[in-house]
Amino acid sequence: MDKESIFLRTAEAALDRAKKLGAHLAEVYISSTKELNIEVRDGRVETMKLAEDRGLGIRVIQNGRIGFSFSTDLSPRGVEDAARKALDNCGKASEDPFNRLPPPGTDYPALDIYDPAIREATVEQKIEMARYMEETARSYDPRVKIIESSTYQDGEVLVCVINSLGMQLSYRSAYCGIYLALAAGEGDDSQTGFALDFKLKYDQLKPEKVGREAARRAVRMLGAAPVTTRRVAVVLDPFVATGFLGLLGPALTGEAVQKGRSLFARKVGERVASDKITITDDGAMPGGIASAPFDGEGVPTSRTVLIEKGILKGYLHNTYTASREGVRSTGNGVRSSFKGTPEVGVTNFFIEPGQVPPEALIRELPDGLYITEVMGMHTANPISGDFSVGVAGLLIENGELTRPVRGMAMGGNIMDFLAGIDAVGNDLQFFGGRGAPTLRVAGMTVSGQ
C-alpha cells in the first residue's frame, strides 16, 4: 500500500473516532513534507540538510464551538488522543454560528504539480548545479569577490483532507529552486547582489542565468553614492514591485477586513489604484509554485481578481470568512502545516503584466530613478498603508540608466503609490509565490543629501 493510501486510511480512522466521540462535524488533515537544502561555497558543500515532517490535524465542531488538535503520532493511540483533545478544546471555545466545514467541491482543477525528475536527480547533480551557478557568477566579472550563498533547494508534499460531509481528497506536489547571494568589490566599495529561480520542473532551472543575474546586480551598483532630494518619476524593477505585494496581500483578505485591519475595508466597487493595475490571486495557475487542486480545507482553488483596472472587486476568503460575509470561499484557506488551522492567505499572488517593454518605460523619461533595492519594507503599516523605506538603484538621465545611487529614502502611502502608477511593463516575474512586472510611478519624493 502506498503512502497516499495509508494516509487516507489513517484519516478515515481519525474521522470515525471523532464522530464516535460525539463530534457533530469533523475534519482530518494529514500532510507529509520533505525538504532538501544544499549550500555551496568556494566549490565545496558547506551545508546539506534533509528535513521531514508529517502529522495529522483534527478540527471538530460542536454546537457552533470549534476545537482543534494535532499529532505527529499516526498510530491508533495517537489518533485517539488527538480526537479527544480536539473535542476537549471545543469546551474552551466561544460559540460562533459561522463555524462550519465546506462540502465536497464539484470541480477541482487538474494540475501538473509533481515532477518525478526532482526526486530522480541525484544529490551530486544538485550539488553540481549550485557549483555551476557560483562559477558562472565569478566568471562574469573579476570584481565578484565573495559568494555568500549558492543554494539548491527542493521539497515535496503529500496532503490528504477528509471531512464528515463526504469530502475525501489528496494530492502530491513538488518544487525546486536555486538562489545566489554574493558581493562585488572595487577598492573600498562593496555591493551585494542576488538572484533566484523557483520552478515546478527540474529541467527548467537555469543556474547560468541566475549566476549572471546576481553578479550583474552587484557589479552595476559599484560606486553608488547618495544624490540630492528630488521629486522624480520612479521605476521599480520586478523584485522591488513584488515587495509591495507583501503589504497588499494581508489587506486584501476577508479576515483583515472583518477585523478592521484593512485599508481596503468597505471599498468594493471603488477605485483604489491606477487603471493600469490589475491584481490577481490564482491558486490553480499552471506552473505556479503555490498551485494546488484544493486549499487547506478542501475547497477547490481558483483565480480571483481582486483589483481590476484599479477597481476593488472583492477579497480573499476561507470557509469561515466567506460564511460571515455571505459569499463563497475563494479557495484561500491556507495551511503552513498540519499544526495549524486554515487561515486566509494568498497563493500565486501577482500584478498582471501590461503591454510596454520595460526599456520603453525608462526611455520615455528625461530624468528619474530606477529602484533595484528597498530596505525596511517590513516596517510598513498594513492597516494605514503608510511606508518609509530606504532605496537604492540607478539614475535615469535622458532615457538611459546612468550612475548607481544609494543612501536615500522614499515614503508615502500605498494608496497614493498605486494611484500614481502610470505604466506597467510586460515582464511579469515571479519570486516564489508572488510576482510583478516593472512598474513606473509618475512622481515620488526621494530624500537624499
Image: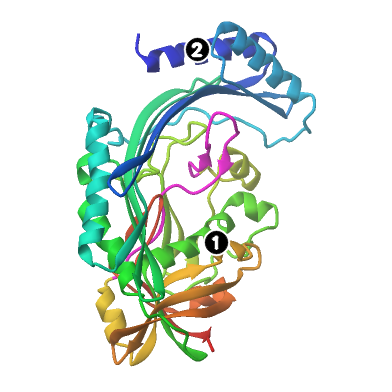
Name the residue: 55% across, 69% down: 270
**Above or below — where is 397 with respect to 196?**
below
* Residue 236 screen position, x and y as percent: 40, 73
The answer for how far apart the CA atoms under marks 1 and 2 are is 39 Å
The residue nearer to you, when weighing 359 against 88, is: 359
Q: Is residue 369 visible?
A: yes
Q: Is residue 348 magenta?
A: yes
In magenta, the rendered stretch is 330-354
Which mark is first along the chain, 2 or 1? 2
Quadrant of the image occupied by residue 219: bottom left
Residue beneath label 2, please?
Answer: 10
Q: Amino acid at mark 1?
A: Leu
The label on residue 247 is 1
Q: Amino acid at mark 2?
A: Thr
Callout 1 touching callout 2 (CB < 8 Å):
no
* Residue 362 screen position, x and y as percent: 30, 82
Name the residue: 53% across, 47% down: 345
Tag count:
2
* Residue 387 screen position, x and y as percent: 59, 71
Q: Main secondary structure of the magenta part?
A: loop
The residue nearer to you, when weighing 130 against 268, is: 130
The residue nearer to you, when weighing 420 against 19, is: 420
Q: Is residue 114 magenta?
A: no
Name the residue: 59% across, 44% down: 322
Label 2 neighbourhood size at 10 Å, few (<14), some (14-19), many (20+)? many
Q: Quadrant of the N terminus?
A: top left
**Above or below — where is 92 with respect to 21?**
below
